[in-house]
Image: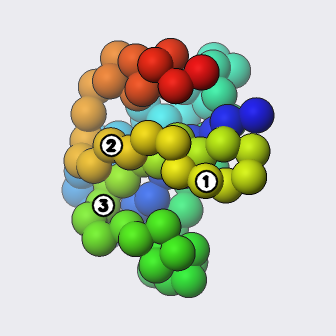
Amino acid sequence: MKKLLYFSAAWCGPCRMLGPVMEEIADEGIIEVDKIDVDENQALTQQYGVRNIPTVLLVDDTGKEVAKKVGANPKTTYIEMINENS
């Protein structure tokens, strides 16, 4: 089962803007969303090569990256990313 990894930080303005969008996607049951604080999870951040935040990765059940979006995008962008890779 695929899921979204949402890389963010409390001090990041665009991350705070994207947070409600990610919560909405999770609440609607569209896909599982794991929020990852880059300051608290540096190893995972490095593992996926995240350089800018917010970054949202679509990963498969093995944890392999399937798709990636950087920056705060509209909800429709993430829905399209999920649908294109399902």
Which residue is rendered at x = 38% and y = 45% of the image? 68
Q: Measured from the top left, where is residue 33 in percent x and y?
A: 61, 41
Quadrant containing the N terminus in the rendered view = top right
Q: Which mark is residue 53?
A: 3
* Amino acid marked by disc 3: Ile
Q: Is residue 5 above or below residue 85?
A: below
Determine which of the numbered discs, if any, sits on residue 39 in the image: none
Q: Which residue position holds label 1?
A: 64
Which of disc 2 and disc 1 is earlier in sequence? Answer: 1
Please state which of residues 20 and 63 is positioned toward the viewer in this rendering. Answer: 63
Question: Which residue appears at 32% of the width and 43% of the height?
Answer: 69
Q: Which of the 4 quarters of the picture holds residue 51?
A: bottom left
Is residue 29 something one can see in this rendering?
A: yes
Q: Which residue is mark 2?
A: 69
Front disc: 1 or 3: 1
Q: Residues within 10 Å of mark 2 (few under 14, many from 20)?
A: some
Disc 3 secondary structure class: loop
| Residue shown at 42% from the left, 26% from the top | 81
The tag earlier along the polypeptide, 1 or 3, is 3
Amino acid type at mark 2: Lys
Callout 1: 10 Å neighbours few (<14), some, many (20+)?
Answer: few
Q: Position of residue 37 (x, y in %)?
A: 50, 68
Q: Quadrant of residue 18?
A: top left
Q: Looking at numbered disc 1 in the image, what kind of residue is underneath it? A: Lys
Nearer mark to the viewer, of 1 and 2 = 1
C-alpha gap between disc 1 and disc 2: 15 Å
Q: Residue 9 location in percent, x, y?
A: 39, 66
